Amino acid sequence: MNHWTSLSDFLHMGGYAAYVWGSVGVSALALVVEQVLLKRRMETIVRSLRQRARAERMEQGLA
Amino acid sequence: MSSPFFRFASPVRFYPMAGKLIPWFWMAASVFGLVGLYVGFMVAPTDATQGDGYRIIFLHVPASWMSMFIYVVMAGWAAAGLAFHTRLSSMVALALAPTGALMAFLSLWTGALWGKPMWGTWWVWDARLTSELILLFLYLGFLALHAAIDEPKRADRAAAVLALVGVVNVPIIYFSVKWWNTLHQGSSVSLTKAPAMAQTMLWGMLLMALCFWMYSIAAGLTRLRAIILEREAQASWVLQLPEAA
């Protein structure tokens, strides 16, 4: 099944290393960046919701 | 309004359901991705003419398919929002656009890295490449137009019109290799004839396509949840969520 003779043979990609790993690397990076941005976006909105919920609870407590 | 379809059409119901679904799509994306990469890089043989450079196909084709598919789905939800004024529909369209743009970018990037060793150039202004670039601009235009209009409902409507006009570009991308004499090769997989590639190559490609598909759903749902909270921030149900406690 496996036609690679060694790890360096695999990494060499038959001479196309820069093109193949450049595709794999940037694809992986793009997905990671998207997830980091999504996580931040979610944290920002949840943080502001928490503040508002706390403010509302305090108002009710005073009333 | 009691059918299951309409029950989840409300953000109140949809938000927690999406939260439960996301981990499953992540799991499916991981499994398809790991098996797909294994088949594509370990099992599939070296190509007779393109050597190991062809292995870019396992990212290029899935990204290209998803960039077109997401656009059609996005335009469909934008149209539904335009026609039925359902809150969630326009949010779905907005949630899909960045992931679609990412897929279009990856299609162009991996295409350039594949074109250089095989054609001797990173880029040509040929019909397939140019129409895919236009797709990326349509996604970015959709997002920019939406961001430029302050009132969400008006932004939804304007962006929906742009998305619908842009739909015409999708069949152009798909059929470009048939309609014009392009440098880009014809489709590797066709519904009407046997695939012109080894079985294991085909399987690697299909598994990676499923991985990208599941990833896109997970990313889209995650962004949709953020958009729901942002847009419904004034609603009382949002403040009663466990996240807000």
Image (cartoon, coloured by chain):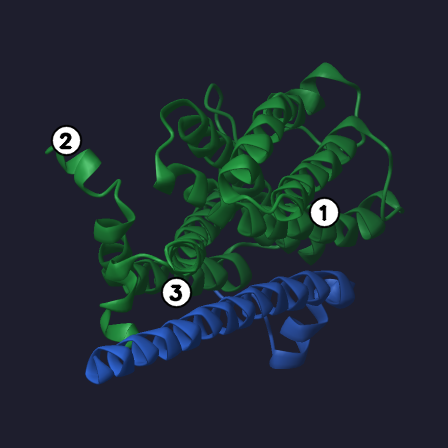
Chain colours: A blue, B green
Pick the front one: A23 or B72: B72
Within-10-Å neighbours for mark 1: few <14, some 14–19, many 20+ = many
Q: Is residue B30 left or right of residue B148?
A: left
Q: Residue at x 73, y 53 (%)?
A: B109
How far apart, in angstroms, are the residues tagged by discs 1 and 3? 24 Å
Residue A60 lies in quadrant: bottom left
Output the chain of dot 3. Answer: B
Q: Is residue B185 left or right of residue B167?
A: right
Asked if one can make out residue B47 in the rendered structure from this viewpoint, the answer is: no
Residue B207 screen position, x and y as percent? 42, 51
Q: Classify the position of the C terminus of chain B by image quarter.
A: bottom left
Residue holding disc 2:
B1
Q: Residue at x 71, y 32 (%)?
A: B185
Q: Is residue B96 left or right of residue B102?
A: left
Q: Residue at x 75, y 61 (%)?
A: A19
Residue A18 lies in quadrant: bottom right
Q: Nearer the viewer, mark 3 or mark 2?
A: 2
Q: Is residue B182 left or right of residue B93?
A: right
Q: Residue furthest left?
A: B2
Within-10-Å neighbours for mark 2: few <14, some 14–19, many 20+ = few
Q: Amino acid at mark 1?
A: Leu
Residue holding disc 3:
B30
Asked if one can make out residue B59 in the rendered structure from this viewpoint, the answer is: yes
Residue holding disc 1:
B108
How far apart, in angstroms, are the residues tagged by discs 2 and 1? 44 Å
